[in-house]
Image: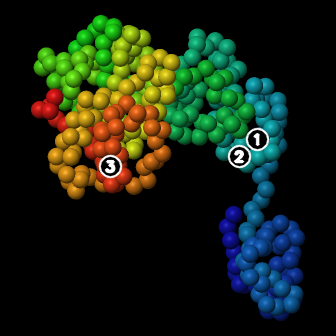
Amino acid sequence: MKRISLDSLIQESKASAYMQQYRYIRHKIETNQIKPIKNSPLNGKTPALHTRYWLIGPQPDYTGFIEELQFQIVPAINADYYLNHLDVYEKERKWVLLLSNYLKNQAQNAAGPVSVNERSFQIWGREKFLQKEQGKKVLAHCGVPMEQLLVYGTTEPLAYYSADRQAGQTVLIIENKDTFYSMRKYLLNGFRRMFGEEIGTVVYGSGKGILRSFTDFGFCVEPHINAPQNRILYFGDLDYEGIKIYERLFELFCGEHEIEPFLGAYEAMVQKAEAYGMDFLPDTSPGQNRNLSGRFLGYFTDGMKGSIERILKAGKYVPQEILNIGDM
């Protein structure tokens, strides 16, 4: 609604006497043409008037919408919300009708689940309507759960390289791109032993991306990488966030694999960091969650654990990139 000032209304009234002005404005209020803005100050006269008002336009006729919601929308859509918020229905009507049409004519013939974006395009002609636009809000207003649309989420594909395609190998998940690239190059050059471990496959974790990809891990990789007899190592930055990624990954894989820290690589990082000196190391990013479970540090010797804790407590961290292909 638009706003209008008391002065503008008085000019509009063309009345010179205050009581005539007052009656003019009261008439507009009583006939729902204007509405006082409650927090606007009074004009200091008797009888008093507010100094600002909302302009009220003609009220829309929603009779057709009410009949449509009551008799034309499929029963699978709960119309209660829209019947109580007809102005919202006016804005979302296009999307509701498309959903109603899908539920009436196509849903029962669905061959099976499809991706969220695929179903979104099928119903609304917009592939990102459910994920990034107003699709979830429309579903909530319709009382239709996402599961009813038979959809599944997708994650970013995992990048990996296998030098060994047999089950029973050691798989290394790497947090950062540069380190993944260097270790992949090392394997491509025909070398397998890194920091005391025989590595068969390297997987690019993409920071926290590995946590999102975990649900599709078995789908994203070939069977020899997800074989139950494999040993899986994790290697990331030595900071709170990198350690939290490991601890969360351990929880997600629990029952399938025991994810272990790549001890030899972490020890090489610490030794190189100590050679550089604490002042050379970068500062820890502010706002990191410092509540660690202790699971990660529990794999290390007391001496190495102490070295890692000293770095963290000093507000420093050691990036994976401290190591390069020459250190392997």
Mark 3 Cα within 10 Å, few/some/many (few <14, many 20+)?
few
Q: Which residue is mark 1?
A: 82
Q: Which residue is mark 3?
A: 310
Q: Nearer the viewer, residue 102 or 275?
A: 275
Q: Nearer the viewer, residue 270 or 62?
A: 270
Q: Residue at x 23, y 38 (%)?
A: 269
Q: Secondary structure at mark 3?
A: helix
Q: Is residue 22 left or right of residue 287?
A: right
Mark 1 Cα within 10 Å, few/some/many (few <14, many 20+)?
some
The image shows residue 52 at horizontal and vertical percentages of: 72, 77
Q: Residue at x 74, y 29 (%)?
A: 77
Picture disc at residue 88: 2
Q: Secondary structure at mark 1?
A: helix
Q: What is the tally of numbered marks visible in this picture?
A: 3
Badge 2 amino acid = Val
Q: Residue at x 43, y 21 (%)?
A: 258
Badge 3 amino acid = Arg
Q: Quadrant of residue 301?
A: top left
Mark yes or no: residue 237 visible: no
Mark nearest the camera among 3 and 1 is: 3
Q: Are marks 1 and 2 in contact (CB under 8 Å)?
A: yes
Q: Residue at x 77, y 52 (%)?
A: 60
The image shows residue 20 at horizontal and vertical percentages of: 86, 87
